[in-house]
Image (cartoon, helix red, strand yellow):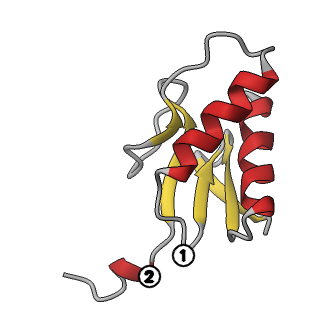
């Protein structure tokens, strides 16, 4: 057992079912019924992230739906949570980190 597990960032995908993410089993949202309903997406993201221990930060694997990504960034900014977004490189077939906060 690694002694660093307690200090690792939570790893979450944006929305379930949009992309395979090796090593990532949990998502911020299971689904989005209406991508245009920004208020509901924001409320759903807040409710989801409020139930996570983000004290060591968040690694967000961006799966699309910009409104979800923006809501996560805003949540992390408002709550002073370190955030790194990971974007899929279709050429190299790997996720590339982008430190945000």
In the rendered image of this protein, does residue 56 appear above or below residue 35? below
Query: Is label 1 in contact with label 2 (beta carbons under 8 Å)?
Result: yes
The disc, 1 or 2, on the residue closer to the chain's N-terminal end is 2
Give residue 7's mark. 2
Tell me which corner region of the image, top left, top right, bottom left or bottom right, holds residue 78. Answer: bottom right
Quadrant position of the C terminus in the picture: bottom right
35 left or right of 33 in image = right
On screen, residue 36 above or below 1: above
Say which residue appears at 71% left-offset and 47% top-offset: 72
In the image: residue 90, left or right of residue 11: right
The quarter holding residue 42 reads top right
The N terminus, quarter of image: bottom left
Which residue position is annotated with label 1?
56
Quadrant assignment, res 39: top right
Q: Residue at x 57, y 40 (%)?
A: 47
Q: Secondary structure at mark 2?
A: helix
């Amino acid at each position: 057992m690694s002694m660093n597990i307690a200090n690792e960032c939570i790893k979450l995908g944006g929305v379930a079912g949009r992309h395979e993410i090796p090593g990532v089993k949990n998502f911020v949202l299971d689904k989005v019924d209406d991508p245009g309903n920004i208020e509901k997406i924001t409320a759903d993201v807040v409710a989801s992230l409020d139930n996570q221990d983000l004290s060591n930060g968040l690694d967000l694997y961006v799966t699309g739906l910009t409104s979800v990504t923006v809501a996560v960034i805003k949540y992390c900014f408002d709550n002073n949570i370190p955030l790194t977004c990971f974007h899929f490189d279709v050429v190299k077939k790997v996720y590339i980190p982008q430190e945000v906060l």
